[in-house]
Amino acid sequence: MKTLKYIRLIMVVAVAGLAVSSCMDDDWKDPTGDIPPYGNNNLQATNVVTIAELKDMYSHALQEQTDTARIKEDIQIKARVTGNDVGGNIYNQIAVDDGTGGLLICINFGGLWSYLPVGQEILVSLKDLYIGTYGNQPQIGTPYTSNSGYTSPSRMNHTLWQEHFKLLGAPDASKVDTLEFDMGKVKDEKYMQANCGRLMVVRGVTLPQANGERTFAPEDAASSGNAVNRMIGGSTRIVVRTSTYADFAGTVMPEGKVDIVGVFTRYRDTWQILMRQDGDFMKAE
């Protein structure tokens, strides 16, 4: 674990160095600092669609589950970041939401939180990116085909990403809505389709495996993907999924009733709550 934390420290320092370098380079052209040093500042909001409209336009790709679709239209989405890699639990992805729905954008880069904090609004040019699902979860990225022949949107390289997004104003976390999850609809497919990928909170639930000693993600209990699922209440259809690399992986799970905040993703018919950082779970009032 010490080695891991050392590696993460190096990554943070490297990202910070890049940011300083970018700002200095940009200041030669823009001494006022008004031009963001990240993204493509030439992008224009010429044909913005909502996330809900985008999902309707590419419903065939989101239902296929075995392939992706290249977005051929010159369209954009405008949304706010609701989740990133700040706590190490969301890896090479950001979650975005525009009020009509959420989705994940896959980016092959660490330290995304440094310039895409929660509350940052972005304009994303979708032309020539790919849309599809991984385990039924809608994602944007570039195609990756597994050994089994399953193709899904995966991590686009960082250079490509820089060409496809623009920062809009300063980040404002107060403009990010946390929706309340309805435990009565945990098996409702339409509810799952409408809300997967969104920042939500589930209130007053218990973690049956909590005993005062068990942690969220001990390394020796990792399931596939170096992550651990912890059941919520008595349902196997909703879990807290924590990476063994998350900063809070070794935190002891709270006993009693708790509120849990996170990006609610899906893997097939299972809800997966991806907490973003320590503090996304608390004792219920």
Image (tube, rainbow, N blue to C red):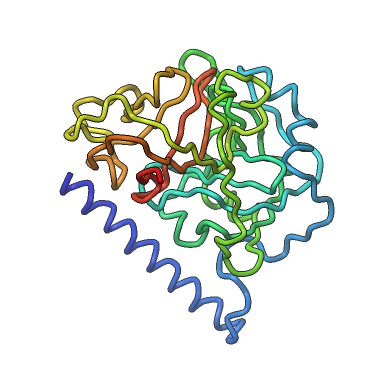
Q: Residue furthest bottom?
A: 31
Residue 137 falls in image quadrant: top right
Residue 209 falls in image quadrant: top left
Depth check: give the residue in front, 151 or 25. Answer: 151
Q: Residue at x 55, y 50 (%)?
A: 82
Q: Residue at x 40, y 53 (%)?
A: 86
Vertical placement of 102 versus 238: above or below? below
Q: Residue furthest right?
A: 46
Depth check: give the residue in front, 111 or 127. Answer: 111
Query: So how many labels did they put on this image?
Result: 0
Please state if 103 lies on the left or on the right of 60 as rendered.
left
Q: Residue at x 50, y 75 (%)?
A: 23
In the rendered image, residue 176, in percent from the top left (x then y), is placed at: 59, 54
Please state if 32 lies on the left or on the right of 2 as rendered.
right
In the rendered image, residue 263, in percent from the top left (x then y), is placed at: 51, 40
In the rendered image, residue 3, in percent from the top left (x then y), is placed at: 17, 47
Vertical placement of 152 versus 148: above or below? below
Q: Residue furthest top?
A: 148
Depth check: give the residue in front, 229 or 8. Answer: 229
Please state if 88 lies on the left or on the right of 100 as rendered.
left
For the N terminus, give its image quadrant: top left
Vertical placement of 19 versus 181: above or below? below
In the rendered image, residue 107, in percent from the top left (x then y), is placed at: 52, 45
